[in-house]
Image: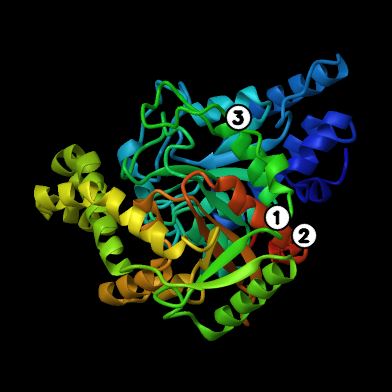
Amino acid sequence: MADPATLRRLGVVDLARAIASGDVTAEDAASACLEGLRTVGARLNCVVRLEEEEAMVAAREVDRRRRNGHPMGPLEGVPLACKDIFFRHDRPCSCGSPIMDGFVASETATVLDRLSKAGALYLGALHLPEFARGTTGQNETLGPCRNPWNEDYVTGGSSSGSAAAVAARLVPGALGTDTAGSIRFPASMCGVVGLKPTYSLVSRAGVMPLSWSLDCVGTIARTALDCARLLSVLGGHDPVDPTSTPDAPCEYEPLVTRPIRDLKVGVPENYFFDQVADPIARSLDAAVEVLKDAGAAIEVVRVPDMMRTEAFSRVVREVEAATVHAGWMRTRAGDYSSTMLERTEQGLYFMATRYCEALNLRALVLGEFIDAALKDADVLFVPAVPIPTPRIADFEDAQPDEAAALMEGLARTSRAVNYLGLPAIVAPCGFLPDGLPIAFQLFGRPFSDPLLLRVVHQYQARTEWHQRLPPVAFDPAPEPK
């Protein structure tokens, strides 16, 4: 067997290639990742549940098929995991809440079915805040997920376990969901690539909803090319999800590797950079220079009133979350954490006319944003998280209003894009003085997902931030916390 630590450093595309060629067996790859999830995963508290026996049986079947000359799928033998919010038939799903204790799914999420048909190995379910509500990755029942770069710091949420597992080289890729930044926060804080696709591009059938008008299923991996491989499998129409795009799946990888000499990158002069910490601003400036050196033209743009967009986004998010949880809040209020219950109850007090207004004006607000911010630019370049990553203790010791203000600062540049339905991606571009990652973020027009991946791919071809390893990759021994 190849060295497990070496195997775990291979990304999605490289590992798929190695398994297809026979240089690596799927059994060895699955065994290496499972070992990492058992040890480092426990240390980081990023794992909820493993499916070890099933994964190893599937891995041996992949190796048998390869030896017998069967065609190999695009993810054949690649071990993956996902946030514990995706249903699998006849399997438990906790959604990070005691309310789901004893729940067994009667269906399998479309995206998990598509991964399986592409040959991927499902290893297990990963940490998340309660019902995917949380910017930081904390969970009163499961405990906090810990950042691989420094375990005293938050991972970001709510796809906390997915980002931590990918960053720690426990799995080459993972699935998450994004309702207000829940893929992008943890990907940014953990130093990996996080893609929130265009709304409707990826099916949400079989995924526990938070806000059905905003939720997106997306990918977390180490490179844009890895995310492109995953998206090629996941995207496209799903008859079980009537909101999904009518288009067929697309092969994204050939589009991603093209140069960016013909592209214009917009940098907003208002709102998005208003509250960016100095070390983050310096890394963002350097990232813009890399894109300029790659041939992209940099355009200064102005965005419309983002506070209005933020307000509409909040109305939709809170009302729909309260609708999803209304029954449980009436009958099982005591099984929610106090924070989750308080936040979700807020949605019960919005007027119906306010919610309808937010939905009705969505197309108009989107059109205004595109006309202003993307009229003279192909993509918009903004901070991923504008303030330094907080410590876990910063929230444990904070008063409620202090914690709310800190979360507001973390989320300021990410939430509105879900209301607009646009694709967004984050990618690492440096490190803070305390060793925590910094990331930039790109927005694009609807269904410009391959364009965002293309820009990040060209950036990663010229930088090495995504290749750096967190401390746990060198020192995996569990340490009690």
Left/right of residue 395 with respect to residue 324 in the rendered view? right
Q: Give the residue number, with chain letter if any, for mark 3.
A: 115
Task: Give the number of the mark in front: 2 or 3.
Answer: 2
State how far apart marks 1 and 2 are (Cα). Answer: 6 Å
Q: Give the residue number, with chain letter if any, for mark 2.
A: 461
Whether residue 314 is situated above or below residue 273 in the rendered picture: above
Task: Give the number of the mark in front: 1 or 3.
Answer: 1
Q: Earlier in the sequence, mark 2 or mark 3?
A: 3
Marks 1,2: beta carbons within 8 A: yes
Marks 1,3: beta carbons within 8 A: no
Q: Which mark is residue 457?
A: 1
Q: Amino acid at mark 3?
A: Leu
Q: Amino acid at mark 2?
A: Ala
Badge 3 crowding class, 10 Å Cα cut-off, few under 14, some 14 to 19, many 20 or more, is many
Badge 2 crowding class, 10 Å Cα cut-off, few under 14, some 14 to 19, many 20 or more, is few
Q: In the image shown, does 45 or 356 lie closer to the viewer?
A: 356
Badge 1 crowding class, 10 Å Cα cut-off, few under 14, some 14 to 19, many 20 or more, is many
| Residue 344 picture location, percent across and down | 23, 52
| Residue 208 picture location, percent across and down | 37, 37
Whether residue 406 is situated above or below residue 219 in the rendered picture: below
Describe the element under mark 2 as helix, strand or loop. Answer: loop
The part of the image, by quadrant, that contains residue 206 is top left
| Residue 301 picture location, percent across and down | 47, 71
